[in-house]
Image: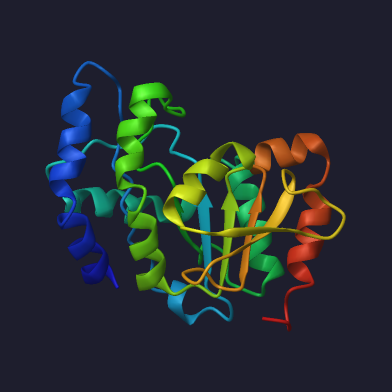
Amino acid sequence: MRESLLKIYLERREDFKEIRAKFPDEDMAGPLLMSPNAIYNVQPLPLLIIGQETNGWHYNVDDLELQMKVYEDFNVGIDYYASPFWNVTRKVEKSLGNAPYSCAWTNISKFDLDNSRSYGLYESEISKVDDLLLKEIDILKPRICIFFTGPSFDERIKGIFENINFFEVADYNLREFCRLEHSCLPYHTYRAYHPNYMRRMGYENDFIEFISNLRGRI
């Protein structure tokens, strides 16, 4: 899996360099390059978490293997503080019957800007490598995907997955929580708010209960 991921990243190395070169005076961390740990593939329900962008990262655009090592050392937040994002991710793993720190994680944006979301021309340039997500999913073959991206990234999602469909889930409207349907995604693919906002909105417990109820149906 690591070699397959490295191959697709090396094919886009010049694109990564070009994005960084266009904004030499900006703090643009990345790219975020996946390298899931050894227990991902042996889980009952291999889980892929897809976020928005990093909140700061490393800058090894010339050494992509080193950048993948950064991901490996981070190990889906094993030594990171219990932010809402990782706290809810741990609950999702447990709800599915998976081991802690066993998910894979990537973001729609491979770069962040000043430890946050890009915008305008920055976002336009960064989005040129959004399509890498298609190849990452093809390599990882998750049984369940959760986009913690909220509705503000729906247009980016539509740009990656041509003719994707959004379906309401339970009593929630499409902005709050939905299932995504596309030939490149597993049936159980969902888009929810970022866990921080989900927690503030008061539906974290309902979300975790929904995920728990998926066990035995996937």
The residue located at (30%, 22%) in the rendering is 27
Q: How many marks?
A: 0
Q: Is residue 59 above or below residue 47?
A: above
Quadrant of residue 197 in the image? top right
In percent of width and height, residue 171 lies at 87, 55
Residue furthest top as drawn: 25
Quadrant of residue 15 in the image? top left
In percent of width and height, residue 161 lies at 46, 58
State which quarter of the image contains the N terminus. bottom left
In percent of width and height, residue 98 lies at 60, 73
The residue located at (83%, 55%) in the rendering is 206
In percent of width and height, residue 118 lies at 42, 27
Q: Is residue 49 left or right of residue 150?
A: left
State which quarter of the image contains the C terminus. bottom right
Residue furthest right as drawn: 171
Residue furthest front as drawn: 163
The residue located at (48%, 43%) in the rendering is 156
Quadrant of residue 3 in the image? bottom left
Q: Does the image show residue 36?
A: no
Q: Is residue 17 above or below residue 104?
A: above
Name the one closer to the observer, 76 or 199.
199
Q: Does the image show residue 21?
A: yes
Name the one closer to the observer, 118 or 92.
118
Q: Is residue 191 left or right of residue 16?
A: right
Q: Looking at the image, what colour scheme do you see?
A: rainbow
The residue located at (30%, 28%) in the rendering is 28
